[in-house]
Amino acid sequence: MLASWFGSSDLRVMTPLLAAVAILIAFCMPVLAAEQRPNILLIVADDAGYADIGSFGGEIQTPNLDAIASVGVRFTQFGVSATCSPTRSMLLSGMDNHLAGLGNMAEFTAPNQKGKPGYEGYLSESVAPLPALLKDAGYNTYMAGKWHMGEEPEHYPAARGFTRDLTLIPGGGSHMDDMWGAKGERQLYTFNGKPIPALRPGFHSSEDYTAAIINNIEENRADGKPFFAYLALQAPHDPFQLPPEWRDRYQGRYDQGYDETRAARIARMKALGILDPKATVFPRLPTVPAWNDLPPEEKRKSARSMELYAAMVENMDANIGKLIGYLKTQGLYDNTLIIFLSDNGPEGNVMAMGPPWDNSNIEDWGKKKTFIQYGPAWAQVGAGPFRMFKGFLSEGGIRTPLIISGKSVAGSGRISEALVHVKDIPATILDAAGVSHPETFEGKPVAPLQGKALTPILGNASGAVRGPEDWIGWQLFGNRAIRQGDWKLLWLCKPFGTSEWQLFNLKDDPGETRDLAAEKPEIRERLVQHWDKYVKTNGVILPDVSPLCGKNYAG
């Protein structure tokens, strides 16, 4: 290879000086490549709320994420989809989820969407997966955690660009070694692309996924390649399950209830500069009773569910800390770009869990074979001031924490109010790695990236990636939204909304409490036109059956 650079097939014909230079270059190449191209660590929390993390106002102890935030940038206007797989498809493609194969969650694909482009239920073969592009560019690519973007071998992480993985292929299940799904069925896990029959005894998702990433980095350090590590945590997604020493970590901490806890979070958010002091707050849902109106036993159960949730978040943070500590001790931290986000808002929807799950004894909650959730009241706490939670295109469902720090991130502890979107993450990573997005992938044409690299924001305090004319769209389960600047157009079906377009100014009203559609008809109409363009550009098909809106909503 060296000889080909210099036009000769035999190093012996080179001058001694030229040969020495060539050998020196060859010897130093891996080191130089690693220094010039950053390692990339992408961490995704599953169902963590906007206000859960300490640096975003939460009382839960998250010192490791807070430390990352203290030397990086916190984004307060970061948008995702309202559920897991649509967000993840955008995160690994840079394309709208309707183009990336998850126009709807596979579990809820409507009859009129089946077989249509963009509704395949897996990461589409018409996009260029981010890990595959990085792998082709010389990166080691590792994944550990939840996939949720296709359950056939040709759709596994190993088939989409990851060289090594430890993966829960479906969308959720036990955090423990029993491998249970929602009905007690056996869930599919893969290790380096192959299904595995069992997990190690004592497995816990946050601990083992983090350990897998550390092991992969360590075992391949000698090759000199930079790494892309995707830590797709299951936590704090239900069921809330923890190792024994973690289950009582927050005992008694939520006896004051959800109303007081939410108010305290919002006050901290304002003090931290995460939230404007005059920000509106979405009121407690009418279906949720005031804490003081609950009977004592209901208070006990409700507080216990939140104790377990908080411990899940802190346990997640502790394991992230192990990974950050490893990078520091091995001299890798300073050359690593670190990105942390949550895939959607907190989970407020409750499933009725019967056998084989057993929640009958509150003393056993948090153990293997219990399926604990915390319901809409505590989910509203997780969403802070915002409206609703996971599943809904209101701010509580689609605004989540984003922290970026590390290599090439200027400043310490900055807060950015720039409007950014999950589609921007792949563009940012590719830009940092010096990798171009291709026009074709595996012989097929692919559309240009829709996301925008956040490099201008990361490099200075006043950067921006979107101008006043730029806008972003959403559609999920028949609900829909458009965001342009401070303005948001929102359509939520009854009984969660009005089944009509509503207009909110999020700068003045982040709680989405004042509908200005009648007062600002010209803005409403402009955003409706953007919606029409969004539908055409991304091939949106409104479902004829929706898990939130039913069959007879005004689709």
Image (cartoon, rainbow, N blue to C red):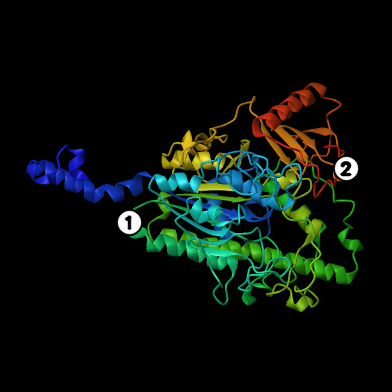
Q: Identify the amino acid type marked 1.
A: Asp
- Tell me if mark 2 has few (under 14), some (14-19) or many (20+) residues whose alpha carbon lies within 10 angstroms of its own: few
Q: Which of 206 and 4 is in front in this view?
A: 4
Which quadrant of the rendered structure holds the N terminus? top left
**Would you say 9 lies left or right of 373 here?**
left
Q: Residue at x 80, y 44 (%)?
A: 281
Q: Which residue is labeled 2 in the image? A: 552
Total numbered circles: 2
Q: State the residue lying farthest toward the top.
A: 522
Residue 365 numbered tag = none
Q: Determine the secondary structure under disc 1.
A: helix
Q: Which amino acid does label 2 sit on?
A: Asn
Q: Assign a secondary structure to mark 2.
A: loop
Q: In which quarter of the image is the C terminus?
A: top right
Decide which of 441, 279 is in the foreground and name it: 441
Q: In this view, does 236 lie to the left or right of 73?
A: right
Residue 72: percent from left, percent from top: 52, 46
Measured as percent of width and height from the top left, residue 70 is found at 54, 50
Q: Name the residue under label 1.
A: 223
Looking at the image, can residue 513 be seen?
yes
**Mark 1, residues whose alpha carbon is within 10 Å: few (<14), some, or many (≥20)?**
few
Q: Where 8 sits versus 193, above or below?
A: above
Which residue shows up at 67% across the image and 73% down it?
247
